[in-house]
Image (tube, rainbow, N blue to C red):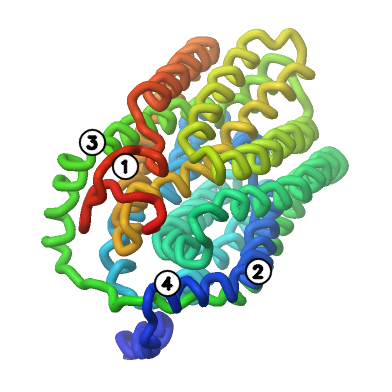
Amino acid sequence: MVRSTLRRLLQLDKPLPNHTPDSFAAEVQRNYRWNFAVNLLDGATFAIGASFLSAATIIPLFINKLTPSPYALGLVAIIAQSGWFLPQLFTANFVEALPWKKPVVVNLGLFLERMPMWIMVLSALLAARSPLLALLLFLLGYAWHSLGAGLVATAWQDMIARCFPVERRGRFLGFTWFLGCGTGAAAGLLCGYMLSKLPFPANFVAVFTGAAIFVCLSWVFLALTREPAPPLEPRKTTHTQYLAQLPTILGTDRNYRRFLIARLTLALGGMGTGFVMVAAAKRFNLPLSAGGFYTASFLIGQMLGNLIFGLTADSRGHKLSLEAAALAAAASFAAVLLAPSPAYFHIAFILIGLNVGAINVSGILVVLEFCSPDKVPTYTGLTNTSIGLLTLLSPLLGAYLASHSYTLLFLITAAINLAALLLLRYHVHEPRFAPTPEKTGTGTVFSSRC
């Protein structure tokens, strides 16, 4: 019964048409505008929901109302930074064997990613009567949502790689997040209004309800995607065989290995982000409404980063965008250390937004250009799970440093981001233009194959 239900949900019995590579490319072009539109609306409405649940501003304020412990903030940062990344390698082999990716994203994603949003609304309802229970419920709902997103992430990235040609992926994600952040910036102002005008915990009930509504609305648009049928039957390997090929990838693909080291360094440089809002609040004794206004600044920066780096990446590659992300992060922490008044923290949050905007676009899409199409789940899974493992520990390190000195935390994270910039700049070749020979199965291939 369970197996038959799962087969229906994943559409395992749906036949594949007899596609050639040329007919597959024709189908991609035929559905390009439709897929661009519905996925743009999906990403934009999801981004609005995410602005109501900002891990940089809104969530730290809510957690700080429930407990003064910096380790609770560290745990939230672990969930925020590793929940999406960590599960991907463990689902990659399963996803590679599936002929259709959309059923995982839509059918399983509804229960794994969307439904848990309402648990966070319940936690806010209980915040005044039972702060500990509210904290536990929030962490449960947030972890369920974040890990659920990670479980469907490899299928979503593979579906995006199928639906959009390599030279148009940057503008797709860039415009998607630009639109989402533009409306999300207005939502951030609305958050500030609700947090200041409504009493606690009604203010957070309203904010989390807005997040749940928009995240669930985005699912409706996602379900309208027209996934092109693949030209070949997927290859199936055992889990043991799949794991055995991972060291080969790292051993033979030198450019990807160097990229992975640089990308992990860039991820480690984000460990101070979740503490910026709390540092500002403690230093200047800010009201709760400041969280909404700083969210607006963060989203303005992210909106600019999405648009600028999305368009740039389509013509010049994604490595340049990641270099800019590292530089923006280092500058943001320098701005935090030097800020003489609360107004200067808007500069820091705009820079953090630029960093996130670049990573949202290029951090996802650059990996697709290191591999052949059939290996997209493996490369994305290996990259993102490695980041997830790192971010299990880095927020705890951030919490430890913050418990001693916020200044020390921000100095170290600024230095780590400068190191990531140097690694990307001088040790990684842009995969789209790298003069490396094509390899089959594993290793670097020219981007036209992705």
* Residue to which mark 3 is pinned: 254
Q: Looking at the image, can residue 65 be seen?
A: no
Q: Classify mark 3: helix, strand or loop.
A: helix
- Reading the chain from its start, which is encountered first: label 4 or label 2? 2
Mark 3, Cα crowd under 10 Å, few <14 / some 14-19 / many 20+, is: some
Q: Quadrant of residue 392?
A: top left
Q: Would you name the residue on which mark 4 appears?
A: 101
x, y percent for residue 283 = 68, 14
Q: Secondary structure at mark 1?
A: helix
- Rounded to the nearest whole Å, what is the CA distance between mark 2 and mark 3? 37 Å
Residue linked to disc 2: 33
Please tell me the numbered disc located at residue 386: 1
Q: Nearer the viewer, residue 409 or 326?
A: 326
Residue mark closest to the camera, 1 vs 3? 3
Whichever of labels 1 and 2 marks the residue nearer the N terminus, that label is 2
Residue drawn 41% across the image and 65% down it: 155
Circles 1 and 3: CB atoms closer than 8 Å? no
Badge 4 marks a residue whose secondary structure is loop
Q: What's under tag 4, amino acid-wise?
A: Lys
